[in-house]
Image (tube, grey):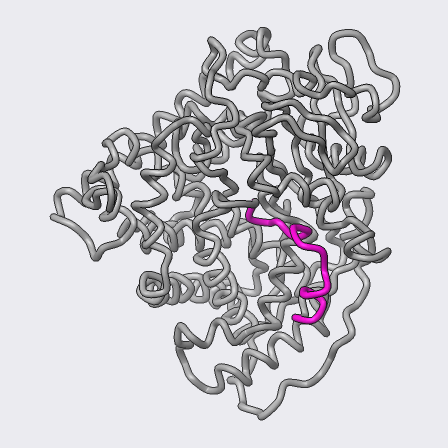
């Protein structure tokens, strides 16, 4: 979850509807907007709407970026919005002395769900700094070591499920099972709660409601705000019911903790019991609810997508999977349960994860606004409060940074020497700045651990007819991805993993609408 520091009050006043002034149209604050290209064939009022599919607006924006270049604008219902995808421009917007997070588009649409939670707080709202300072120690090394055993326990529930599927000759639903895994992991490690996801035939109602609220937030971007109550009447009623279910679920989690008299110092204990170290202030009950929903949603939704994409690429590139598996066997040996420190030693597995996040960052965009009058990358004047949306998948495919084969899956792009030689701020799967995702180390440790365990236990066999389709619900997730499993023999130790450095080319890039 990408955030920005409370100290940068770029927009300290709000419009009557509660949104920061300037939210409704990025044209406010761009004195030379005419210099920024836009799609052709605009129509009155709707503008460029017909170039935006209601189910795939972000992927449509990626295709537009390929045609129009590293910065372009799009008009929707009378307002212009600026999109950035080039590394030079995005790198300049990472300058914390001139830019801050902008809560806009789909993120602002989530405020009825999570209010001023860590992800959705406006820059002028004080609860971000309070919650961040109280919760940041929950992600230090000592805390992470404490989570490791629970991550292993949840992963064992996944492998038990996959063993049963394998025995029955069934394929596995990768996104569905990764969602169960990551929801149970954040629920147990952060809040001492068990949703029983692996014992259910259908997704837990919390997951259904969460997907509903995310999808609704995205749909709001494709209709004029004045017409939304009419055009989305049924969806609005469902969204209200989804929000109520999320609130009830979290209230049950908090009440169970209060009845138990406390946990083991996890995130919920910190929310309920810890005062700010300087001010002594505590989180209010309403803010506790908002932060719990934020962590449950963000703590599993993006990680499940990252794992799903990584498993897709591992199945499609058996030589990469063999190299990663050899590393797991070498580093873990015949130890039945890997220790906390052994996860960080899976450097090639981590590169697989990073490369998957490069091609399909599951949080696919983040917005930045100018905190003072400035000029973006020396080319585009911006007044204070002007903002733009950075398209992370296109930033991660900028050929000036990643080369002419930027659409190709190649984990060696994250070999240490390559990383050192790359322009800063060109890889941003967790946002940027002081309010970049607070749980990024948690997510990376969990995902690396799970990939190692699955590679050690199974050979991943893809469906040769499957072509990657990406579902959008503000986040990215592979759609319809199923894999067949073959059980591996017990690992044997070796002194060195084989040097299979070549990476196969992906058949195509879904941004172009072909292949995977």
| 391 or 309, nearer to the observer | 391
Give the residue at the far bottom of this rendering. Answer: 495
Asked if residue 265 is among those painted magenta in the image, a careful observer would answer no
- Residue 280 position within the rendered picture, expressed as x and y whole percent measured from the top left: 20, 40
- Residue 361 position within the rendered picture, expressed as x and y whole percent measured from the top left: 63, 48
Quick check: 222 left or right of 155?
A: right
Residue drawn at (57%, 65%) of the image: 169
- Residue 465 position within the rendered picture, expressed as x and y whole percent measured from the top left: 76, 54
Residue drawn at (82%, 19%) of the image: 34
Q: In the picture, residue 54 is in which quadrant?
A: top right
| 474 or 271, nearer to the observer | 271
Residue 119 appears in the rendering: yes
Residue drawn at (76%, 29%) of the image: 380
Q: In the picture, residue 405 is in which quadrant?
A: bottom right
Residue drawn at (60%, 77%) of the image: 325
| 506 or 63, nearer to the observer | 63
Residue 208 appears in the rendering: no
- Residue 474 position within the rendered picture, expressed as x and y whole percent measured from the top left: 58, 35
| 131 or 461, nearer to the observer | 131
Q: Vertically, is 261 above or below 311?
A: above
Asked if residue 427 is among those painted magenta in the image, a careful observer would answer yes
What range of the chain is rendered magenta?
A: 416-431
């Amino acid at each position: 979850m990408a955030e920005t520091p409370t100290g940068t009050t770029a927009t300290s006043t709000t419009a009557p509807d509660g949104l920061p002034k300037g939210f409704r149209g990025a044209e406010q604050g761009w004195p030379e907007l005419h210099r920024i290209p836009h799609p052709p064939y605009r129509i009155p009022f709707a503008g460029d709407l017909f170039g935006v599919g209601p189910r795939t607006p972000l992927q449509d924006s990626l295709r537009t970026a390929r045609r129009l270049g590293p910065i372009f604008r799009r008009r929707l219902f009378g307002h212009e919005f600026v999109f950035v995808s080039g590394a030079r421009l995005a790198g300049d917007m990472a300058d914390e002395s001139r830019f801050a997070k902008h809560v806009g588009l789909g993120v602002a649409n989530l405020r009825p769900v999570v209010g001023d939670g860590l992800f959705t707080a406006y820059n002028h709202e004080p609860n971000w700094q309070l919650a961040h300072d109280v919760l940041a120690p929950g992600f230090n090394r000592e805390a992470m070591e404490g989570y490791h055993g629970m991550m292993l326990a949840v992963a064992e529930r996944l492998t038990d499920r996959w063993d049963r599927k394998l025995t029955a000759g069934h394929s596995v639903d990768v996104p569905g099972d990764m969602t169960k895994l990551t929801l149970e992991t954040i629920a147990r490690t952060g809040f001492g709660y068990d949703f029983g996801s692996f014992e259910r035939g259908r997704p837990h109602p919390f997951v259904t409601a969460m997907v509903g609220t995310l999808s609704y937030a995205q749909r709001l971007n494709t209709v004029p705000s004045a017409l939304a109550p009419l055009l989305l009447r049924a969806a609005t009623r469902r969204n209200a019911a989804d929000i109520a279910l999320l609130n009830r679920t979290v209230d049950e989690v908090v009440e169970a903790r209060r009845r138990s008299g406390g946990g083991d110092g996890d995130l919920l204990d910190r929310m309920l019991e810890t005062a700010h170290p300087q001010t002594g202030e505590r989180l209010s009950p309403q803010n506790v609810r908002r932060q719990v929903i934020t962590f449950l949603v963000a703590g599993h939704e993006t990680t499940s997508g990252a794992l799903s994409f990584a498993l897709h690429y591992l199945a499609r590139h058996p030589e990469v999977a063999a190299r990663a598996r050899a590393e797991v066997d070498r580093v873990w040996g015949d130890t039945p349960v890997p220790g906390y420190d052994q996860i960080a030693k899976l450097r090639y597995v981590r590169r697989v994860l990073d490369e998957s996040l490069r091609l399909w960052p599951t949080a696919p965009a983040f917005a930045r606004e100018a905190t003072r009058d400035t000029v973006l990358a020396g080319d585009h004047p911006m007044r204070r409060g002007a903002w733009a949306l950075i398209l992370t998948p296109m930033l991660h495919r900028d050929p000036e940074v990643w080369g002419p084969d930027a659409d190709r899956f190649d984990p060696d792009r994250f070999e240490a020497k390559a990383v050192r030689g790359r322009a800063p701020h060109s890889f941003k799967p967790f946002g940027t700045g002081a309010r970049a995702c607070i749980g990024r180390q948690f997510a990376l440790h969990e995902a690396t651990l799970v990939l190692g365990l699955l590679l050690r236990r199974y050979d991943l066999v893809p469906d040769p007819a499957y072509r990657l389709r990406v579902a959008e619900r503000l986040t990215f997730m592979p759609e319809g991805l199923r894999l067949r499993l073959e059980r591996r023999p017990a690992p044997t130790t070796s002194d060195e993993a084989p040097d299979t450095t070549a990476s196969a080319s992906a058949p195509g890039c879904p941004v172009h609408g072909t292949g995977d």
